[in-house]
Image (cartoon, rainbow, N blue to C red):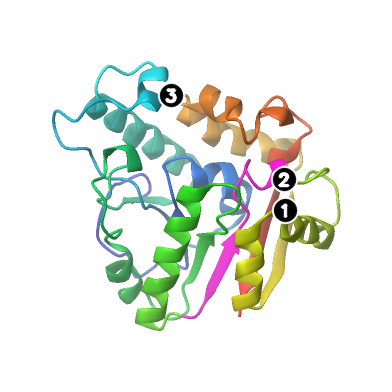
Amino acid sequence: MSGTVSPLIDRRWRVVVISTHFDDAALSLGGFLLGITVPKAVVTVHGGAPESGTQLASWDRDCGFTTATEAHATRLAEDDRACAILGADQVALNNPDNPYRSGGPLIGLRELFASLDADVQVLLPLGINQPDHGVARDAALAALDSTGHRRVGMYADLPYAAALVTDWASAPAEALASELAAHDAGYRALLARYDLRISHSITLGPSEWSRKRDAVLCYASQLSLVGAMGEVRHMGALLGYPGAMQRELIWSVG
C-alpha cells in the first residue's frame, strides 16, 4: 500500500519513521529508507487538514498558495509521490500544521504505537535546531513511554542539524555528535536523559543520492523557502552535491 494515506496499521511494517512535517523524512532519512527492503511507513505528525476557511499562513502564502486547503492538498499529494519513491506507506495523522492549530496535545501517536508489534523499529526526529520537531519528538516519546514500546531510534533533522556544525558531510560521526552537544541545548537534555549512541552513519554515493533527490524534489512547493530559512541559509545550495544532504545519522536510544 505504498503511497496510500491510511490511519490503519499494517502488521508487516518493520520500520516506522515519525516525520514532523510532510518533507522531513525524505530530507533526513531518504537514503536510509531507500536502502532497506523491509515493509516501512512514514507517519507525518502534522498531516491533518486545516479547517475550511482558515486564514492562509504567511509561509504558505510565500509558497504561492491562495488558500490553506490548497496548501494542504498539494503537500499531501507531494508526500504521496515521495513515499512511493521511498517505497514507504504514507500515514498522515490528523494534526494540522502549527499555523492552523488551536493548541492542545498532538493526537494519534499513542494509538499508532500501541498497535505496533514490539520488534518494529520506530525512528523519531532528534529535534535539533527546529522547535516544531522537538515538540513532535517529546510527544512521541511520551506516547512510547505509555505503550511500553522500546525499539526506538532518533535521526538527525536535516538540514537543521547540519547547519550547526562545520563539516557535516565528511567529519567523523562522533565528532558531529560532540558539536551538536556543544551547540544545541535540546540535544544535551536528551543526552542527560537517554543513552544515545550513533547506530548508522550513512554517506550516499551518486546513484543513491539521485534517488533520494528525486524523493525530496517531490516537495517542490516549499523547497525554496526551506533552503532560505535563517537557520540554514549559510549552508548554500540545499541540494548541492557533494554536500550535507548526502549524510544521514541515526542514534539508538537506551
Magenta span includes 169:
no
Q: Residues within 10 Å of mark 3 (few under 14, many from 20)?
A: some
Q: Secondary structure at mark 1?
A: helix
Which badge, 1 or 3, is on the more N-terminal residue?
1
Q: Splitting the image into 4 quarters, where does residue 254 fall? A: bottom right
Residue identified by numbered label 2:
164
Residue that lies at the very extreme toward the bottom in this rendered image = 148
| Magenta stretch in the rendered image | 150-163
Q: Secondary structure at mark 2?
A: helix
Q: Nearer the viewer, mark 1 or mark 2?
A: 1
| Residue 119: image location, x then y, percent | 47, 79
Magenta span includes 155:
yes
Which residue sits at x=22%, y=37%? 50
Of residues 142 and 93, the one drawn nearer to the viewer in this rendering: 142
Residue identified by numbered label 3:
221
Disc on res. 198: none
Residue type beneath disc 3: Ser
